[in-house]
Image (tube, helix red, strand yellow):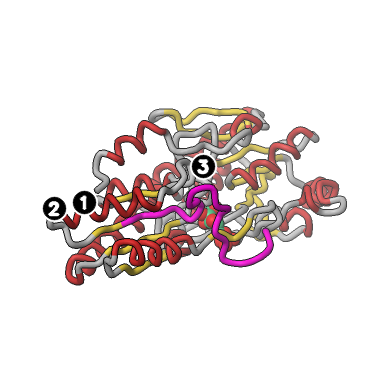
Amino acid sequence: MKRVGVLTGGGDCPGLNAAIRAIVRRSHQHGFESVGILEGWRGLTEGLTRDLDRDAVSGILHVGGTILKTSRTNPSKMEGGFEKVEANFKKIGLDALVAIGGEDTLGVARSLHERGLPVVGVPKTIDNDLGGTDFTFGFNTAVSIVTEAIDRLHSTAESHNRAIVVEVMGRHTGWIATYAGIAGGADVILVPEFPVDLENVCNHLRSRHKLGRSFSIVVVAEGARIGKDENIVSSRGTDAFGHARLGGIGMILAEEIEKRTGFETRVTSLGHVQRGGSPTAFDRVLATRYGVFAADLVKEGKFGKMAALRGNDIVAVDLADAVKSLKTVDPRLFELAGVFFG
Ligand code: F6P
């Protein structure tokens, strides 16, 4: 009987419980016992576990968040952090581990695998910035949430002849802004991959007004930068992986637009609404496919691998390759979005 630990690390997102359920159910089919590791890597540095049998995952497919809870604990930044993980892995009596997370969580998984820990990865994040896979689960749901918000903001912007700036998450990439901007018919989309030219943005809005379009929607990713400015952060300090807490560019942009164009401008920052609630059907299916595949990787002893989407196939990629560099927005997609600017 193999005992397989499961953990969820980093920012939570819809779909995590679908992935957990799939891992547990497939593991059960393989004759494995699943063990819930609580609060991401903290659960292995401190030995925090919970039962994870069929009853524990019954009825959670559609539920947001993660029944295992999560954290941004980074063992590589702790005195003896890796040794604590390895000691608790043995103490809990695990034979393998499935880590569900983004670049930070799976970067730790990669390091632990290089030290001999039998671990496989499942790609999760609303940011979709993880290399090695076409999509992470959580992304589709975040795009749907932002698209619905943009649809709603269109009606109030038009009623008041206003420009409305929508600030979205995505950390240092603009996947959410680009996809939701296209889906929501935004008039301007601003992403970290391409520096913001304020005068260019204002000219787009002015040209709309000249055509009688008295309102505009501007979608800006939280990691976008105005010219060569540094990122706008909402508070001092960084998390255990060195990430500053981004946020606030939307307000600055709205003030600049109103000052330069004279158009009444408002801002909506969607924040953690993008990470809440029930996953879309797409994310439920993708998370389920990833979870089953990860349990099969354990069965086949293929450790150091991550389940990944390539086209419509789920394949195994090396964790080392997946976490090597951020996946940024494809310039061709952004060029397509640009067809509809202004
Ligand atoms: O990585 C997902 C994400 O939502 C980013 O888009 C965002 O910048 C960050 O997490 C927010 O982190 P926290 O929830 O710890 O504030």
Amino acid beneath label 1: Ser
Where does the magenta region start and end? 218-238
Amino acid beneath label 2: Leu
Which residue corresponds to the image point at 38% horizontal and 30% vertical from the top-left?
312
Query: Do the numbered discs 1 and 2 sit on residues whose CB atoms are within 8 Å?
Result: yes
Which quadrant of the figure shows ligand 1? bottom right
* Residue position for label 2: 211
Amino acid beneath label 3: Asp
User: Residue 276 bears which disc, if any?
Assistant: none
Above/below status of 134 relative to 41: above
Which residue corresponds to the image point at 34% horizontal and 62% vertical from the top-left?
260
The secondary element bearing badge 2 is classed as: loop
Q: Residue 284: x and y, percent?
A: 40, 48
* Residue position for label 1: 207
CA gap, disc 1 and disc 3: 33 Å
* Residue position for label 3: 129
Closer mark to the observer between disc 2 and disc 3: 2
Q: Residue 299: x and y, percent?
A: 62, 32
Q: Is mark 3 within 8 Å of ligand 1?
A: yes
Name the foreground residue: 112 vs 61: 112
The secondary element bearing badge 1 is classed as: helix
Residue 67 visible to the viewer: no
